[in-house]
Image (cartoon, helix red, strand yellow):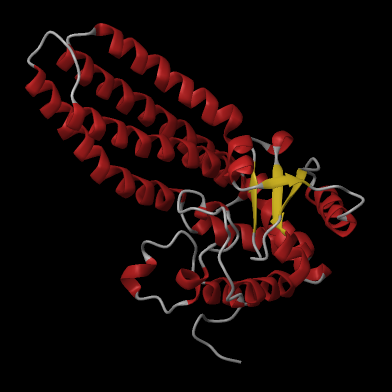
Amino acid sequence: MTLYTQQSKNVWRTWLLMSLFLVVIIVLGFAISYAYDSPDILYIAVVFAVGMNIMSFWYSDKIVLKTSGATPALKSQYLVLYEVTENLSITAGLPMPKLYVIQDPAPNAFATGRDKNHAAIAVTSGLLALLNRSELEGVISHEMSHIGNRDTLLQTVVVILVGFVALLSNFFLRMGMFGGGGRRQNGNVQIIAFIVGIILAILSPIAAVLIQLAISRKREFLADASGALLTRYPEGLANALKKISAYDGKPLAKASHATAHLYISDPYPSTENRKKSGLSKLFMTHPPVEERIAALLGKSAGKTE
């Protein structure tokens, strides 16, 4: 897979995801408007679906940065971070992304933004304290590759849309339990709303996992490989991944399962470090660190030094 085919696929997947979200919300709006015999509900659903798609495309990066606790990194305070990122931006032929820092001892990082001209990279204070310069270059090159591949557009839109599906399931469950007005029989309305809520409550976490898997863990291998080509020093990223995966402190305070796929490493150390079975690997948002390191260093996953 080349950089350009990955970019094209990510753009196509993003528009597909947003279209599916639009259709699902409109169908739900039609069902509820029919149950309540109120066309206004359908109009509201259409406006809501269109509005959420617009917001997820234009503002999802800002929402993700805000919810992760990221604040702008001052060049005077994080000079090495700026120097590394500026050098890699020039090498990659990409605009300089905005830099953010998350004040958290857990080492991690992610990239976000709808395109290369509106990109941002956030790193934790723990990452900056843990890694040396070559390892930091490896991590930033990985995130720069996500930006160049346009992974960031799809990854960030997923966070917003999946989150709203979960909110909708909760809304319909409450509607079903507490009822509402309408010209149709109130009991039937409650039953329909409750059934919709149950279906959404069951499907929303499944949809979240499936959508994250649809993004594909291959994006991490591709970003690793692209990052290694960018620095010409795969050992830097490999060593960084070793250090990050070896961290056994508290997980990121503001991380969530909805945003876990954004990070360079699973923000929950207990799930990242434990031995994975073949079945459990299918539901991981990241490939096992051992496999990523082996790919970077050109070794088989099970081979020991």
| For residue 38, side relative to residue 289 (left or right) | left
Give the image quarter of residue 184. Answer: top left
> Which of the two residues, 42 or 118, is positioned nearer the viewer here?
42
The residue sitting at 58% across, 46% down in the picture is 151
Name of the residue lying farthest toward the right: 76
Instruction: Write the residue at 36% across / 39% down.
Output: 166
Instruction: Determine which quarter of the picture holds residue 7.
Output: top right
> Where's residue 158, x and y in %?
47, 41
Residue 233 visible in the displayed image:
no
Count of numbered circles in the view: 0
Q: Residue 69 in the image: state x and y as whole percent.
A: 64, 47
* Residue occupying the point 48% across, 58% down: 217
Left or right of residue 64: residue 137: right
Where does the C terminus fall, quadrant-wise?
bottom right
Q: Examine the image and state in which quarter residue 179 appears.
A: top left
Q: Which of the pair 169/97 is nearer the observer?
A: 169
In this picture, residue 145 sits left or right of residue 41: right
Residue 102 position, x and y percent, is 69, 53
Asked if 49 appears above or below 158 in the picture, the reply is: above
Against 147, is 224 above or below? below
Residue sitting nearer the eye, 232 or 279: 279
Confirm whether residue 72 shows in the render.
yes
> Residue 225: image x %, image y %?
64, 63
Q: Residue at x 18, y 32 (%)?
A: 177
